[in-house]
Amino acid sequence: MSRVTVSIDPHVHSDDSYDGHEPVELILEHAAEIGLDAVVITDHDVIGESKRAADIAEEYGLIGIPGVEVSTAHGHLLAIGIERMPPRRRPYDETIAWIREHGGVAIVPHPFQRSRHGVRERNIPVPGSDGAGAEAGGELADGGTNAGGGNALSDAEGGGVPEVDAVEVFNAWLFTGYRNRRARRFAAEHGYPGIAASDAHHLEYVGRAFTEVEVPGRESVDAVTADDVLDAIRNGTTRVDGRRAPIRMAAKHYVGAAGRKSGYYARTGATRSATAARRGVAEIVSTARVAVSQGAHRAARVLSWVT
């Protein structure tokens, strides 16, 4: 059977989020330029711009998939592939059930990180439970493969509480690797597919982590639909990619994003003054410095390992 692999960043914020900064057109343009096949706009508790992004994604050569990051009573939850806003502030398991009933996939974002409204482990439904997972904790080394072999026992099959479809096992915004490793261990222990995402709030972070999804029965990426991607996530044919980029690649990523932003705003007439133009140049210089600084820091770490 033929199969194709698509690269998707399933957790990105636009300026429709209270903490987002970029318009969806710019995000889509950037995603296409850096080689992604899809990017899901998951703004906080609003879905309008995400639906619009999904509608125009084809213009950028991307697969259009709407989504939202919904606030539940127990923490944030990604709803991917839905057309309506889920009810807010409802219990975690009820929100999962709503998402699945409306044809979407429910994904746990940045789990266990309470400072960013991550859900506690005991509130994530797991196979054979009443909705309260055991505290597992611990660490697992980062890697580039799927965290689980597909969704374990579903609510329909087991008659229990509704379960999530996947767990975000690599979030590029986490300050240390501990929470990612803990999430990876949790997903592996319970058989949940793992995904990686940038959780980007600025353009230069889009695609810093992404998920490769293997879709069977398709000859090319152009033939892949949003439903194909959702089914592949449910079936666990995912591979996470969240390793740090090489120094030169990181520099190109930062500078390219800054230049693309300046070009976009110039084209759309958003930069209309010399002051705004100077800010654009300053941003390019600043992002280049960030890239060089990060590169130097990584190089120093590598040297410390071998000396």
Image (spheres, rainbow, N blue to C red):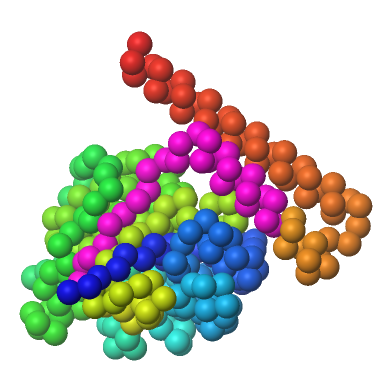
From the viewer's perspective, tell me whether residue 248 is left or right of residue 175. right
| Vertical side of 26 occupied by 254: above or below | above
The answer to whether any part of residue 118 appears in the image is no
Q: Is residue 84 left or right of residue 178?
A: right
Q: Position of residue 125 (x, y in %)?
A: 20, 69
Q: Quadrant of the N terminus?
A: bottom left
Q: Residue at x 35, y 59 (%)?
A: 211
The overriding secondary structure of the stretch rendered in magenta is helix
Q: Residue at x 44, y 67 (%)?
A: 37
Front-most of 230 and 218?
218
Farthest residue, direction top = 307
The x and y percentages for residue 5 are 31, 65
Please say if 219 is above or below 146: below
Is residue 251 shown in magenta?
Answer: yes
**Residue 2 lies in quadrant:** bottom left
Q: Is residue 264 left or right of residue 59?
A: right
Q: Would residue 303 be visible to someone looking at this image?
A: yes
For residue 128, above or below residue 118: below
